């Protein structure tokens, strides 16, 4: 009887230890992705100083988007894919600002609440990468909506809505 109690205690201790380990793996993961993305972008000499790291989970791939300055001191966005694919770098001045997208969003959709506006990469119908601004918001029908605007000109591309329960 005592042996069964010892075995049960060991099993419970292992389960608790594994649960804590699993929890730490899940909660630490975003920071690790950002650290790896920064290290990769710096090692490939694409960015020198990072001001901001944004996680972007597109419909086809996930990216960490870094905003900062390159070796010439120019402000850039660097799109670092989570897989072994080439980095994409764009000067900030080559695109519209998040504020411009926010204004276009207000004109196009009249959102109840804007949740986030962030740069990202999507794949178009021709299977080519498209740099976009993704605006996430709650629309007038109380749906969770993703609207995409082209990065370079700020023109509307497409949107998707999800009904909230």
Image (tube, helix red, strand yellow):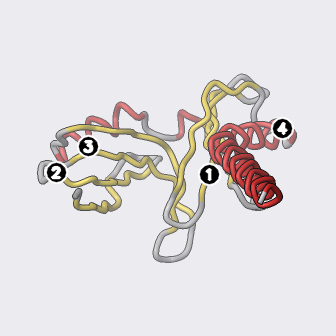
Which of the two discs, 2 and 4, labels the residue nearer the N terminus? 4
The residue lying toward the viewer, choosing from 124 and 4, is 4
Q: CA distance from mark 1 to mark 2?
A: 28 Å
**Contact flag, marks 4 and 3 (Cβ < 8 Å):** no
**Contact flag, marks 1 and 3 (Cβ < 8 Å):** no
The label shown at residue 142 is: 2
Q: Quadrant of residue 97?
A: top left
Q: Is 84 drawn above or below residue 27 in the view shown?
A: below
Q: Position of residue 61 (x, y in %)?
A: 59, 62
**Contact flag, marks 3 and 2 (Cβ < 8 Å):** no
Q: CA distance from mark 1 to mark 3?
A: 23 Å
**Contact flag, marks 2 and 4 (Cβ < 8 Å):** no
The residue lying toward the viewer, choosing from 7 and 107, is 7
Q: Position of residue 107 (x, y in %)?
A: 18, 42
Which of the two discs, 1 and 4, labels the residue nearer the N terminus? 4
Quick one: label 4, few (<14), some, or many (20+) residues within 10 Å? few
Q: Position of residue 145 (x, y in %)?
A: 28, 54
Q: Which residue is mark 3?
A: 105
Depth-wise, is mark 1 or mark 4 nearer the camera? 1
Q: CA distance from mark 3 to mark 2?
A: 16 Å
Quick one: label 2, few (<14), some, or many (20+) residues within 10 Å? some
Q: Which residue is mark 4?
A: 45
Q: CA distance from mark 4 to mark 3?
A: 35 Å
Which of the two discs, 4 and 3, labels the residue nearer the N terminus? 4
Q: Position of residue 91 (x, y in %)?
A: 61, 37
Tell me the element at label 3: helix
The label shown at residue 63 is: 1
Q: Quadrant of residue 5?
A: bottom right
């Amino acid at each position: 009887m005592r042996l069964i109690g010892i075995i049960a205690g060991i099993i419970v201790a292992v389960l608790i230890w594994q649960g804590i380990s699993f929890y730490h793996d899940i909660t630490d993961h975003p920071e690790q992705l950002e650290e790896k993305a920064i290290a990769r972008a710096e090692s490939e000499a694409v960015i020198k100083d990072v001001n901001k790291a944004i996680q972007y989970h597109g419909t086809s791939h996930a990216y960490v988007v870094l905003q900062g300055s390159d070796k010439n001191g120019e402000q850039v966005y660097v799109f670092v894919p989570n897989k072994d694919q080439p980095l994409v770098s764009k000067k900030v001045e080559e695109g519209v600002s998040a504020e411009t997208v926010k204004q276009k969003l207000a004109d196009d959709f009249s959102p109840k609440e804007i949740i986030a506006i962030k740069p990202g990469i999507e794949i178009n119908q021709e299977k080519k990468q498209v740099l976009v601004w993704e605006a996430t918001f709650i629309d007038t029908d109380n749906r969770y909506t993703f609207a995409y605007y082209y990065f370079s000109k700020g023109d509307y591309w497409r949107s998707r809505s999800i009904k909230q329960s």
